[in-house]
Amino acid sequence: MIEGVNGATQAAEDKKKARSNAVVAGMCVAFVGGMVGMAYAAVPLYAMFCQITGYGGTTQRVEQYSDKILDREITIRFDANVSGGLAWDFQPVARDIKIKIGETAQAHYKAQNRFDKPAAGRATFNVTPELAGSYFNKVECFCFTDTTLKPGESLDMPVVFFVDPDIVNEPDLKDLKTITLSYTFFPIEGEKPVAAAPKVDGEAKNVNSDGKAGG
C-alpha cells in the first residue's frame, strides 16, 4: 500500500517537473525568438534614428528648399570612395565649393564602370563633423536610389543640398568653417533567375513565371 502511495507521489512529482521544464523551454524559445526579431528590427530602427537625429553624420532628406540665407559662408568638401570590389571610378567633379549657410547648391560626382559587364552599386553617405549631419539637408541625391552602369558607361551624379541656418545656434558648431560630405559605393547583387531552364531532349525550354516549361 505504501509502495502504491509512494509511486503515485513520484508520478505526480515527475509530471510537475515535466510541466515546469516545458514552461522553461517555452520561455527560452520565446526569448530567442524575441532577440532574433529585435536583431532584424534593429537595422531599420537604427537607420530611422540616424535619419532623424543626424547621429553618426547621417544627412537629412528634405523636400523643400531653405527660405533663409545667412550672410556667412561655409566650405563644403567632397569625398568619394568605392568598396567591396566594385570596379568603378568614382570621384567628385570639384573637390570643394564655398556657399552661404542656407543657400541651395548643386554639386556633381562622376562614376564610370570599368567592368566588362553591367554592375550595380549603392551609395552610403555621411558628413563630418558628425554633429553637422542633422543640419546638412539634401533635396536631391543620386544616393536615394541604386545605380546600374553598363560596361564602360559614365554617369553624372548630382546632389542638391543646403546647410540649415540653425547650425549657427549649435554651440559646438557655431564657429564651423568646413563640412565634408563623403560617399562610399558598395556593389549590390542583381536579380537572380526564378528557376533554371529544364532541358527536354537535350534542348533548354523557357520557364514561365508559374514554373511551367514553355516552348
Image (spheres, helix red, strand yellow):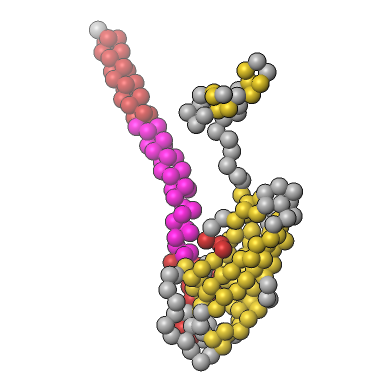
Quarter of the figure with residue 52 = bottom left
In the depicted structure, whether residue 46 falls above or below residue 202: below
The residue furthest top is 1
- Position of residue 104 in the picture relative to residue 92 (left or right): left
Q: Quadrant of the N terminus?
A: top left
Q: Position of residue 142 (x, y in %)?
A: 56, 63
Q: Position of residue 148 (x, y in %)?
A: 62, 53
Q: Is residue 29 magenta?
A: yes
In the depicted structure, whether residue 183 falls above or below residue 98: above
Q: Position of residue 193 (x, y in %)?
A: 58, 35
The residue furthest bottom is 71
- Position of residue 104 in the picture relative to residue 87 (left or right): left
- Position of residue 129 in the picture relative to residue 64 (left or right): right
Quarter of the figure with residue 22 = top left
Quarter of the figure with residue 18 = top left
Q: Position of residue 210 (x, y in %)?
A: 47, 28
The answer to whether one can see residue 95 in this image is yes
Span highlighted in magenta in the image: 23-51
Q: Main secondary structure of the magenta part?
A: helix
**151 and 119: which is toward the camera:** 151
